[in-house]
Image (cartoon, helix red, strand yellow):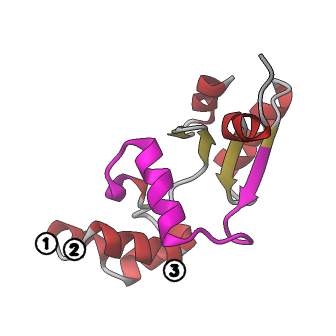
Amino acid sequence: MTLTYRDWMNNRIVVYQKPACSKCRATLALLKDRGAEFDAINYYEVPLTADGLRELIEKLGVPVSDVLRMDEPVARDLKLAKRLAERQLTDDELIRIMVENPDLIQRPIVVRGDEAVLCRPPEKVTKFL
C-alpha cells in the first residue's frame, strides 16, 4: 500500500520547541541520533494560535493547566498560581495567556498524527520511534 501525501504528513513527527531549552535540544538530538525524520517548529518564530495550542493540548490528553509553566517570571507577574487556585481562569483564558506569553508553554511537545507527548524527560519521544 502506498501512502498518500496527506497520510505521510499526518504520520510525520513534529516538535514544538524553543531552541534555548535544554530539554528541547536533548529531544531533537535523540531524534537525530535515531535517524528519525521530523520537523522542528520554534513557536517563538512561528507563534501558536489559540486553536493550534488547544489542538496540541487535546492531543496530549491533559488538562490545560498541565501545559502551563508556573516557574516562569511572567507566571508570577500575572499571579497565575493564585488565580488558578481561586478558579478565576477558564481554559480559554489560560490558552490565550499562553499564546500571548509563549514562555508559559511546557516544552517540547512532540506530535505524530493524533497523538502528542510532552517530552519531559526527553526520552519520552521514543514513543514515536
Circle on res. 100: 3
Q: Is residue 77 above or below residue 37?
A: below
- Pair 3/2: label in front: 3
- Pair 1/2: label in front: 1
| Residue occupying the far bottom of the picture | 77
* Residue located at (57% from left, 39% from top): 119
Foreground of the two, 3 or 113: 3
Q: Amino acid at mark 2?
A: Lys
Instruction: Give the magenta part as a residue range.
Output: 39-66
Q: Secondary structure at mark 2?
A: helix
* Residue located at (48% from left, 66% from top): 51
Q: Are marks 3 and 1 in contact (CB under 8 Å)?
A: no
Q: Position of residue 113 (x, y in %)?
A: 60, 37
Assess disc 1: are there few (<14), some (14-19) or many (≥20) residues with their C-alpha within 10 Å of its C-alpha: few
Q: Amino acid at mark 3?
A: Glu
Where is residue 45, by image quadrant? bottom right
Residue 13 colored magenta? Answer: no
Assess disc 2: are there few (<14), some (14-19) or many (≥20) residues with their C-alpha within 10 Å of its C-alpha: few
Left or right: residue 106 versus residue 47 is left
Q: Secondary structure at mark 3?
A: helix
| Residue occupying the far left of the picture | 86
* Residue located at (78% from left, 47% from top): 39
Give the residue pinned by disc 2. Answer: 82
Where is residue 67, by image quadrant? bottom left
Q: Are marks 1 and 2 in contact (CB under 8 Å)?
A: yes
Q: CA distance from mark 3 to mark 2?
A: 19 Å
Give the residue pinned by disc 1. Answer: 86
Q: Amino acid at mark 1?
A: Glu
